[in-house]
Image (cartoon, grey):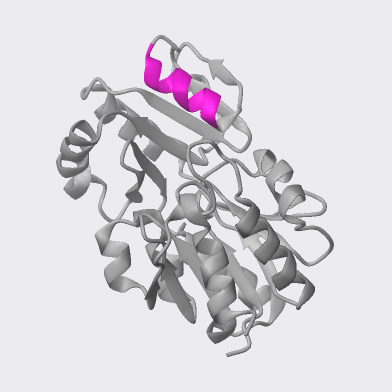
Amino acid sequence: MDYKLLFTDFDGTLVGRDLKISQGNLEAMKKAQENGLKIMICTGRSYLKLKQFEDTIGISGRNLYGVAFNGAVVYEVDTRKLVFDKRLDRNLALKIIERLKTKNVPILVYVLDKLYAENDRDQYSRNYKNSASIELEIVNDFKDIKEDFSKILVINENLVLQEVYLDLKDEVEGECNMFFSSENLLEFTNLEVSKGNSVEFICKKMNIDRSQVIAIGDNYNDISMIKYAGLGVAVNNSVDELKNLSDYVTKNDNKNSALKEIIDKFVLI
């Protein structure tokens, strides 16, 4: 198969906790791009914080896109202009937040490139702010935010978040998406938002058939794009659910150039 697009998740797939892209991955991506493959990042992170990584990979020029906030945003790589921006209704978001507050868990809110919290006293929020390399703005009450929200984040130990998930599952079903983007992050987005929908949006915009697409991920928020792509790949460190749905599971994990393995096996042949 002559693949034309490769969408890669970022955290847990392309990089580890140190946020460094391995030399093996970099060299493979460079060769793949020289051979005509277009590579795009599809992540839960803010789109404004991805440019340094796109520059490192060599993703530049017109007609290239990126996906942020787990599909809530699609942007042009060269201009950073948004071409897709689907948010969580403010009233619904505030309703969800009120329920979350009864669980006594740290809550963060994104409105595009702005990250908000009602306090920064907990270590979870401070750690997230540092890893995301984004300023945290403190508001007296989330109700002070007058715009619709890009997404809601809840941070805690996995066992605590599992309890929150089970408690809210029936309540939010049919109103918004609730999913784990990592074992310590539970997220809420617009019901129409997913990585898969945004990948499909880009493919239609570029007139590329899904059979010519590779998607690589590691967690629950990657399931929709793995199912959409012609070749859906789970890296070795993925959650079991993603592995079971994927066309291929890498032998290497995210710390050992899993992306290089895919490019060598399916692109540079």
Regarding residue 200, the answer to whether it shows in the image is no
Pinpoint residue 266: horizontal percent, then vertical percent.
55, 80
In the image shown, does 259 or 245 lie closer to the viewer?
259
Give the farthest residue toward the bottom: 1
Q: Left or right of 40: which side holds 90?
A: left
Instruction: Tell me the residue at 56%/33% (across/down).
Output: 147
Quadrant in which the C terminus appears: bottom right
Q: Is residue 44 above or below residue 153?
A: below
Pinpoint residue 88: horizontal percent, then vertical percent.
46, 44
Q: Is residue 195 magenta?
A: no
Instruction: Tell me the residue at 56%/56% (across/down).
Output: 42
Q: Left or right of 210: which side holds 77?
A: right
| Number of marks in the rendered image | 0
In the image shown, does 177 or 46 lie closer to the viewer?
46
Q: Main secondary structure of the magenta part?
A: helix
Instruction: Tell me the residue at 51%/14% (across/down).
Output: 139
Q: Which residues are magenta?
A: 122-131
Pinpoint residue 19: horizontal percent, then vertical percent.
56, 39
Quadrant in which the N terminus appears: bottom right
Pinpoint residue 155: horizontal percent, then vertical percent.
35, 30
Q: Is residue 26 above or below residue 21?
A: below
Regarding residue 220, the answer to whether it shows in the image is yes
Q: Left or right of 198: which side holds 141?
A: left
